[in-house]
């Protein structure tokens, strides 16, 4: 059956990454199982809290990118044999069948077919077509199909329809996920002005009408750059870092949030709520990332919770009056606005933060919004005519804890206060 979308368009959402081994684990594979029960519990909690959920296939058999969060480091073996694709489709089929059940009330609005694939485009599009047949309207699942842009960036996917190679408009019930990071080579070498300009330039493409770009969410972004060192401590005393983090956060919030109806942009998910220790020793890639380790780490540049506590993320992103920087008509912040973070903060929450040089801001037609809600934080979304209402577009938490064990195991991790 097709689920009606009863959730408001401006809705809070979480994104939960999942490894295939949570659903389809063979005897010889060295991964820990048992995550599925927690996924079910997570979606039930989300339903109770009024949150929408996007589930993404973060690790596929054979690995779609050779990075550790997929369970295999090194070769990209996903395309080596058809069984990898078949098993991935089986996972998507299982998730679709489970989370269209009436007991979940339509909480799961999106399933992402594959996270950050970097293999040949022709093979990727073949898989996307097969995945769309499993998850999408072909089987009346009522769940939006989300595809990753494979680091080609959104304009490359203009007028993409997984079922029509010559389409002149994007496929229905399709959303596009793009990840924007400034933490990895060569982008980690950019100075502050260039980072802010590139963020603004990226926003321009998502704030135009009639581009053919599918409804697009920025499914991962952070505050990590080469300008400041990441840290699990001392951020409370580092005024310069917190000032930069606040500017960088608000620049990306403005850029990745929709301003008006009809734009490709439908919002964003922040990576993440509370993050394990980060390692950045992968081969250079413009959007490459690595987040592994233990949950006791809470890296400042990757942690929404730290940002709220230390005041470099607005205390209530649903309320533009909490912003430090004005938003211009082009959807970018006025980065010349005078703002300096408080000299020090207690790290106990938004009440401990402050600014000198002013903290008022104006919002010109924007619809960026987010609230902290129990176990997660979320931004608003704006509906597109080709995406079902309730498509998620918000801040998210880290949904996966990656544990090395001759491979990688996924355990759902909620950011509970």
Image (cartoon, rainbow, N blue to C red):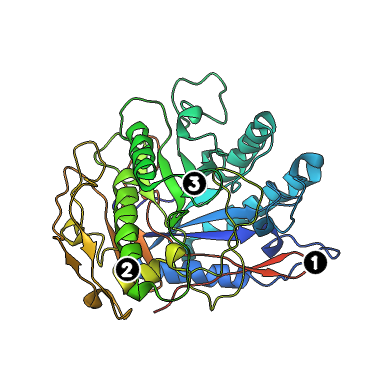
For the residue carrying disc 1, how many other residues have a C-alpha within 10 Å: few (<14), some (14-19), or many (20+)? some
Q: Position of residue 357 (x, y in %)?
A: 14, 60
Does any portion of residue 142 appear in the rendered image?
A: no
Q: Sequence-wise, which precedes: disc 1 or disc 2?
A: 1
Query: Going by the image, does 383 lie left or right of 302?
Result: left
Does any portion of residue 53 appear in the rendered image?
A: yes
- Of 78 and 189, nearer the camera is 189
Q: Position of residue 291 (x, y in %)?
A: 58, 62
Residue shown at 31%/34% (left/top)? 207
Q: Marks 3 and 2, Cα distance to the nearest angstrom? A: 33 Å
Residue shown at 53%/38% (left/top)? 149
Q: Secondary structure at mark 3?
A: helix
Are discs 1 and 2 less than 8 Å apart at CB? no
Instruction: From the image, tell me which residue sits under label 1.
Output: 30
Instruction: From the image, tell me which residue sits under label 2.
Output: 372
- Of 16 and 291, nearer the camera is 291
For the C terminus, the image quarter is: bottom left
Q: Sequence-wise, which precedes: disc 3 or disc 1?
A: 1
Q: Sequence-wise, which precedes: disc 3 or disc 2?
A: 3
Query: Going by the image, does 364 lie left or right of 193?
Result: left
Name the front one of labels 3 and 2: 3
For the residue carrying disc 3, how many other residues have a C-alpha within 10 Å: few (<14), some (14-19), or many (20+)? some
Residue 189 has which mark?
Answer: 3
């Amino acid at each position: 059956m097709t689920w009606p979308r009863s959730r408001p368009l401006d809705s809070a959402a979480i994104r939960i990454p999942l490894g295939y081994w949570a659903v389809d684990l063979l005897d010889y594979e060295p991964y820990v199982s048992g995550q599925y029960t927690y996924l079910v519990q997570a979606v039930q909690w989300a339903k109770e809290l009024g949150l929408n959920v996007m589930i993404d296939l973060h690790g596929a058999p054979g690995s779609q990118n050779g990075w550790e969060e997929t369970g295999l480091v090194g070769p990209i073996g996903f395309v080596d044999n058809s069984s990898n694709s078949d098993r991935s489709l089986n996972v998507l089929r299982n998730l679709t069948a489970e989370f269209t059940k009436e007991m979940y009330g339509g909480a799961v609005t999106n399933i992402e077919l594959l996270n950050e694939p970097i293999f040949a485009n022709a093979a990727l599009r073949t898989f996307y077509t097969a995945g769309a047949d499993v998850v999408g309207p072909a089987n009346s699942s009522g769940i939006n199909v989300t595809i990753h842009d494979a680091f080609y960036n959104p304009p490359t996917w203009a007028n993409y329809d997984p079922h029509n190679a010559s389409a002149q408009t994007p496929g229905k019930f399709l959303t596009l996920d793009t990840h924007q990071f400034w933490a990895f080579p060569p982008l980690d070498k950019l100075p502050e002005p260039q980072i802010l300009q590139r963020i603004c330039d990226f926003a321009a493409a998502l704030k135009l009408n009639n581009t053919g770009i599918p409804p697009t969410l920025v499914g991962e972004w952070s505050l990590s750059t080469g300008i400041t060192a990441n840290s699990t401590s001392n951020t409370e005393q580092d005024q310069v870092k917190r000032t930069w983090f606040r500017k960088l956060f608000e620049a990306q919030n403005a850029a990745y949030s929709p301003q008006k109806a009809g734009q490709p942009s439908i919002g964003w998910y922040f990576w993440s709520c509370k993050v394990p220790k980060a390692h950045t020793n992968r081969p250079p890639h413009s959007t490459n990332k690595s987040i592994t380790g233990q949950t006791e780490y809470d890296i400042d540049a990757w942690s929404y919770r730290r940002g709220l506590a230390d005041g470099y993320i607005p205390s209530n992103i649903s309320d533009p009056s909490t912003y430090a920087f004005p938003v211009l008509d082009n959807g970018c912040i006025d980065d010349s606005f005078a703002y300096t973070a408080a000299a020090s903060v207690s790290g106990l929450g938004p009440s401990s933060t402050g600014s000198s040089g002013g903290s008022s801001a104006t919002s010109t037609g924007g619809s960026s919004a987010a609230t902290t809600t129990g176990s997660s934080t979320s931004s608003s979304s704006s509906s597109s005519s080709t995406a079902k209402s309730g498509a998620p577009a918000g801040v998210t938490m880290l949904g996966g804890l990656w544990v090395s064990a001759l491979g990688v195991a996924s355990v759902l991790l909620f950011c509970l206060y």
